């Protein structure tokens, strides 16, 4: 009960910390999400895969070199038409533009004339001559229509409605209300959108507060109510058109709180499947793109006279057209710590879906993490309460290693994202919440033990008590002990002729070696009584050979007195002593008042030991032990038998029956 009371505060703190942590994790505030995502980023950085020529995706980059060679952006649409024709002739499976064309080309012949300050008659003649020519946008649209092509669409707060090209079928409730939503879209010229086979969202903005793009919307809700539609991502549309599929299939599960709302599970694109998060995003497993997968736009246009040169690099691939030019503002941060063009993220997503290397974080991982946190927390709480600090710390470290290793294994072997950051942090906090008060309590008990017993116990016994305070039962217990009483004979008469300080100095000089004799045998010094002493063994710690220890201590005491006598001046009266030892049951524990108490032993066995010490004077013997002590001592130290001699049965005060005693002789006697 007393131990439980001591542990009550650590238990409350530990369980409180654990419970609070579980509540915080269930609420999943922003800071928890960011830390979790950064740990997942670290996993991706450890050994990112290299995406080489086997990946069926290529990037045409409108880079700085291309802008320097072909002029500032936007380029004439006729130039882009040439690019589309070249890519088609090189065998591209689909050509997808990660850019917008919302306005007419300003370099079209008629628009160019209108921008010139020409005399009216000349302007009219030029308009008449150019009227029959196709606009640059019509040329571009013709190239797109003749090729498997996809155009990008951007989400916006204001703009137009989205009219999807791809059909969308659903297995389960509609996921629209679960998806990330936008009010409208900014699209392209109508002539261009009518020419392509797919329209896909190009938005890849970071969804976390640290501006890192970890996932991109596979489906986005556009609008509200009856007029809402769902916008597939550019990479989804590129995959669909490349396979010749006419529609997409989204599979959902009913929301636990609103069954009419579908929680996205995955999106079927032709023969391929992309797993989705609860809000319709796709999490990218980033790799390192081989530089050969990216071609400068200027290089593609330089090969338009002979596209066969590009066929070996582009044939059968999904071609994405984007830009890495800083001035065009399409650079994004990735979990790998790199800054890349937004088009690269669509390329990475396509590579993931085609290879089937999806990062997975199913809904049930949250429940798994909460369960693991609860188990780990309870383990370290139990360890901190039941084990010594080193053992508890070892269990805590092993628990933390298990959490971290399990999380890493799930990622490296299964590409599954199981968070270890919050479980590890909560386990550490819980362990600290329990360990700190336990250590404080242990330190207080150790200081109490040292303060209470430092002068009465041998250092090895004191150290064992400090390391295991539970072995000390201060409330009192009945146990078998061996009790020793010692009295110095002749000291009183000698001290009467001394100054008080001399008498005290003499007594202290005698009691010092006598005390050391007890402590050397790891006995407990109960008290000093003038020129006498009481000590006992087998308390507070168990000592199976307690009787033998007491006998050896008595012999050492006699030896100490003999050494003292030998050091005195010739003719000085020698000191003598009497030692009585008995083994039996006694009550041991803290005894006294609230203000003053001491660890002591009481009982009939203690009284008998005192009577045996008195008997040494009557029989003129130095050491007497009872028969019980003799039996117990010889069972552990048979060599003492040579020093024992029977002294008969004697009546002592307080006993009706005679007590059998034995003399312990010095080895030189």
Image (cartoon, rainbow, N blue to C red):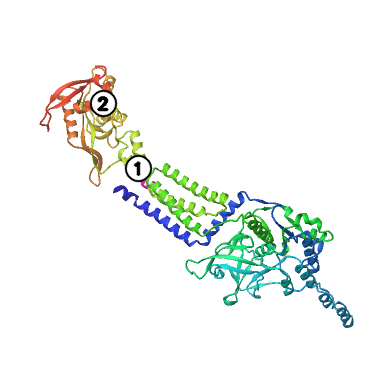
Query: What is the CA distance from the residue labelled 2 to the residue labelled 1?
Result: 36 Å
Evaluate whether residue 294 shows in this view: yes
* 599 to 668, vertically: above or below: below
Q: Position of residue 239 (x, y in %)?
A: 67, 62
| Nearer to us in this view, 564 or 5 | 5
Q: Tag 2, which secondary structure? A: helix
Residue holding disc 1? 447
Residue holding disc 2? 635
Q: Position of residue 579 (x, y in %)?
A: 21, 27
Q: Position of residue 512 (x, y in %)?
A: 29, 29
* 649 to 274, vertically: above or below: above
Q: Tag 1, which secondary structure? A: helix
Q: Is residue 455 magenta?
A: no
Q: Earlier in the sequence, mark 2 or mark 1?
A: 1
| Nearer to us in this view, 403 or 492 | 403
Span highlighted in magenta in the image:
439-445
């Amino acid at each position: 009960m007393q131990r439980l009371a001591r542990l009550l505060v650590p238990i409350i703190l530990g369980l409180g910390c654990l419970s609070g942590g579980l509540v915080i994790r269930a609420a999943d505030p922003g800071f928890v999400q960011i830390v979790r995502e950064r740990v997942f980023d670290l996993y991706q950085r450890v050994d990112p895969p290299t995406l080489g020529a086997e990946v069926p995706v290529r990037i045409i980059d409108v880079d700085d070199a291309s802008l320097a060679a072909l002029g500032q952006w936007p380029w004439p649409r006729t130039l882009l038409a040439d690019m589309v024709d070249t890519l088609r002739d090189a065998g591209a499976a689909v050509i997808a533009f990660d850019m917008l064309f919302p306005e007419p080309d300003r370099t079209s012949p008629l628009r160019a004339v209108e921008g010139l300050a020409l005399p009216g008659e000349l302007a009219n003649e030029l308009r008449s001559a150019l009227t029959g020519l196709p606009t640059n946008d019509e040329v571009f649209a013709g190239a797109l229509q003749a090729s498997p092509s996809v155009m990008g669409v951007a989400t916006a707060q204001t703009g137009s409605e989205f009219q999807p090209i791809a059909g969308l079928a659903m297995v389960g409730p509609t996921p629209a209300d679960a998806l990330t939503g936008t009010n409208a879209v900014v699209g392209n010229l109508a002539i261009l959108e009518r020419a392509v086979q797919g329209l896909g969202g190009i938005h890849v903005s970071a969804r976390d507060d640290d501006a890192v793009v970890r996932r991109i919307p596979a489906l986005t809700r556009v609008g509200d109510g009856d007029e809402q539609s769902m916008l597939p991502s550019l990479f989804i549309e590129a995959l669909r058109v490349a396979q010749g599929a006419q529609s997409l299939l989204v599979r959902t599960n009913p929301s636990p709180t609103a069954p009419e709302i579908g929680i996205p599970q995955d999106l079927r694109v032709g023969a391929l499947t992309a797993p989705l998060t609860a809000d319709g995003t796709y999490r990218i497993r980033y790799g390192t793109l081989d530089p050969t997968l990216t071609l400068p736009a200027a290089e593609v246009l330089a090969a338009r006279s002979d596209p066969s040169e590009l066929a070996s690099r582009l044939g059968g691939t999904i071609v994405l057209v984007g830009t890495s030019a800083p001035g065009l503002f399409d650079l994004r941060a990735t979990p790998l710590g790199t800054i890349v063009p937004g088009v690269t993220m669509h390329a990475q997503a396509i590579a993931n879906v085609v290879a089937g290397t999806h990062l997975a974080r199913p809904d049930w991982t949250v429940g798994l993490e909460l369960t693991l946190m609860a188990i780990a927390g309870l383990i370290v709480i139990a360890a901190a309460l039941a084990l010594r600090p080193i053992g508890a710390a070892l269990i805590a470290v092993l628990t933390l290693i298990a959490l971290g290793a399990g999380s890493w294994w799930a990622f490296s072997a299964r590409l599954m994202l199981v968070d270890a950051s919050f479980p590890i942090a909560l386990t550490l906090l819980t362990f600290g919440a329990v360990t700190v008060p336990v250590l404080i309590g242990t330190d207080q008990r150790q200081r109490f033990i040292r303060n209470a017993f430092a002068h009465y116990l041998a250092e090895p016994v004191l150290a064992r008590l400090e390391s295991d305070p539970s072995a000390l039962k201060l409330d009192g217990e009945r146990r078998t002990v061996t009790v020793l009483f010692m009295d110095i004979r002749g000291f009183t008469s000698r001290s009467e002729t001394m100054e008080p300080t001399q008498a005290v100095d003499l007594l202290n000089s005698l009691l010092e070696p006598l005390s050391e004799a007890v402590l050397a045998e790891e006995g407990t010094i109960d008290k000093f009584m003038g020129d006498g002493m009481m000590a006992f063994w087998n308390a507070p710690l168990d000592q199976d050979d307690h009787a033998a220890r007491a006998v050896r201590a008595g012999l050492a005491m006699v030896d100490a007195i003999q050494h003292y006598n030998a050091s005195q001046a010739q003719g000085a009266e020698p000191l003598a002593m009497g030692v009585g030892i008995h083994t039996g049951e006694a009550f041991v524990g803290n005894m006294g008042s609230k203000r003053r108490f001491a660890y002591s032993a009481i009982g009939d066995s203690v009284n008998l030991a005192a009577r045996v010490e008195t008997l040494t004077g009557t029989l003129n013997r130095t050491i007497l032990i009872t028969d019980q002590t003799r039996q117990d001592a010889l069972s552990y130290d048979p060599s003492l038998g040579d020093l024992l001699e029977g002294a008969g049965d004697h009546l002592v005060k307080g006993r009706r029956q005679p007590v059998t005693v034995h003399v312990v002789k010095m080895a030189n006697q």
